[in-house]
Amino acid sequence: MMTSSVAKTVLLTTLAMMAFAANSVLNRIALAEGAADALTYTGVRLASGAVMLVLILVWRGGFARLGQMGGSIGGATALFVYAIAFSFAYLELAAGTGALLLFATVQLGMLGWAIRKGDMPGWLEWGGFAVAAVFLVLLLLPGLSAPAPSGAVLMVVAGLAWAVYTLLGRGSARPLVDTGGNFLRCLPLAILLILPGVFMQSTSLAGWIYAIASGALASGLGYAIWYGVLPALERSTAAYVQLSVPAIAALGGVVFIAEPLTLRLMLCSAGILGGIGLALWGADQRKRAARHVTPASRAMKKG
């Protein structure tokens, strides 16, 4: 029988994944329906995310004054590039396709960085990422159901920016504080993005609601839930559950925007997510094996 603590962890993890997927769905709804322009939407999302994170941190005592905020200029820059490329990409991409491209690019980008730093993957990881790369290429090949090239490129840029953001924040002792600090650093640029839309009235009431929901709930509150539940999850489990985000986003696109769920997208999604899942599992096995290698056994191998 599931204990209350396990049930709570499962519930919070599910809510976090749904929040991350909601970012794709809300962005796509707002832009596809013409409820908001991409610049205003990005500004409102970042600003409302900053407000929500500050409120959460003040409530939790995360920082007492502005001078103590975490994050960095580099992290804020990566966050801003991700957010604006993400918004413009969804002018042309379906919710599920965009989430899939984003997730795959983040994972491939982090793999490339690990290799550059000398952390060579094992054969399972190479095999998994090779499978993911092949299906990613198949998804992007020209055809009736292929995503728009410009939208795909922008989402790849967003994915690489998020990979940089993740790498900069890896090992953070206060991830939520650092995230709040990065959002706050983006606030002046967010206001600059919002002002033209306010004067030109390019965003409807619905557009404002979608953007605020994306920033305050799907981003701000979503990150708070995720960072709160992370200590209860193994690192490999945390990586695996994120495989569900593109699938949830695709389902949301079908339900809320009536987007078609093509055979090509389903097959390529299975290939990409299955390949990444295999690579994550291979990495977990390799690291577990490395932890069990004793100094004596290392000396014997060298001898």
Image: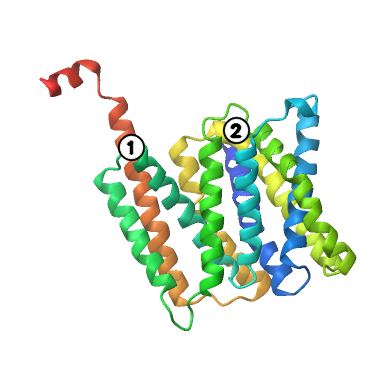
Tag nearer the camera, 1 or 2? 1
Q: Residue at x 52, y 30 (%)?
A: 171
Q: Is residue 261 left or right of residue 209?
A: left
The amino acid pointed to by label 1 is Asp
Query: Which residue lies under the disc numbered 2?
Result: 5
Question: On the rendered image, what quadrant is the C terminus found in?
Answer: top left
Image side of residue 29 versus residue 132, left or right:
right
Mark 1 highlights which residue?
119
Residue 261 lies, in percent from the top left, at: 53, 74
Determine the CA span between mark 1 and mark 2.
35 Å
Q: Nearer the viewer, residue 130 or 200?
A: 200
What label sits on residue 49 in the rendered view? Answer: none
Residue 56 against residue 84 in the figure, above or below = above
Q: Is residue 1 visible?
A: no
**Residue 131 drawn above or below residue 219:** below
Q: Quadrant of residue 224?
A: top right
